[in-house]
Amino acid sequence: MKKLIYGALLISLFMPTYSYAGAVETTAANTTKAVSANPDLNTIKAFYDLLGNPDTDVAILKEHAASVIGLKWDAIPTPLGGLGLEGFAQTFSRYHQAIPDMKWEPQSILKSGSHTYTVRSLGSGTPVFDFLGIGAEWVPGNHFEIMTIDIHTVKNGKIIRTYHVEDWRDAMRQLKAVQ
């Protein structure tokens, strides 16, 4: 498992996105063109749109997410709100309360295998309260922008598994800094 995540990080960070037999290559600049040709990429795009949805109501988030995420969505590590569709809705309700302007913007998407996608994205926002537990060092009004890496498995139009890494340590640094 660690080798898979480290391999994805190396590919996403240090090598340009490339194509190989049966792979899809896309970057932020050409995502729209690639998405229309691949139904799995429609699901991936909808997932990132959902992450930026400002709703905080768990029921509404769950309803929107149901078209993109499998009922038993397996996310590794486990999100704060738990596993599955319910866990997704709980987690992002909390995030959206803390960061109303949250955005997750894919920068590159690399397809490997038949239904696996590695997405390098930028997560950003301006928290309205100290959601990371920074304490007295937190500077209200500070904005953060962090890199994220997600490895998604898509089956039957829904994401059923996601391995994810976010650089929350860098977000903490940015939220403490005098800008």
Image: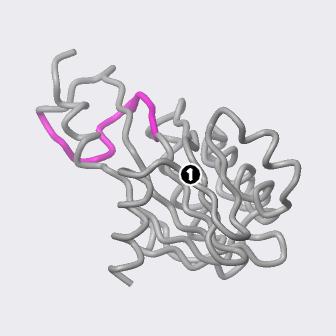
Is 55 rendered above or below residue 60?
Answer: above
The amino acid type found where label 1 is placed reads Ser
Report the side of 101 relative to 6 (left or right).
right
Q: Residue 20: say if magenta.
A: no
Disc 1 crowd, CA 10 A, few/some/many (<14, 14-19, 20+): many
- 70 and 25: which one is in front? 25
What is the tally of numbered marks visible in this picture?
Answer: 1
Q: Residue 128: say if magenta.
A: yes
Is 73 rendered above or below residue 33?
Answer: below
User: In the rendered image, which quarter contains the C terminus?
Assistant: top left
Is 167 rendered above or below residue 141?
Answer: below
User: Which residue is rendered at x = 52% and y = 74% of the image?
Assistant: 75
Report the side of 22 relative to 166 (left or right).
right
Coloring applied to the structure: one colour
Is 88 rendered above or below residue 139?
Answer: below
User: Which residue is rendered at x = 77% and y = 78% of the image?
Assistant: 155
Callout 1 secondary element: helix
- 119 and 87: which one is in front? 119
- 178 and 99: which one is in front? 178
- Point out residue 62 in the picture as x, y percentages from the top left corner: 72, 61
- Point out residue 110 in the picture as x, y percentages from the top left corner: 60, 58
Per the rendered image, the range of residues in magenta is 123-136
Residue 141 quadrant: top left
Q: Name the residue that disc number 1 marks.
A: 93
- Point out residue 163 in the picture as x, y percentages from the top left corner: 48, 71
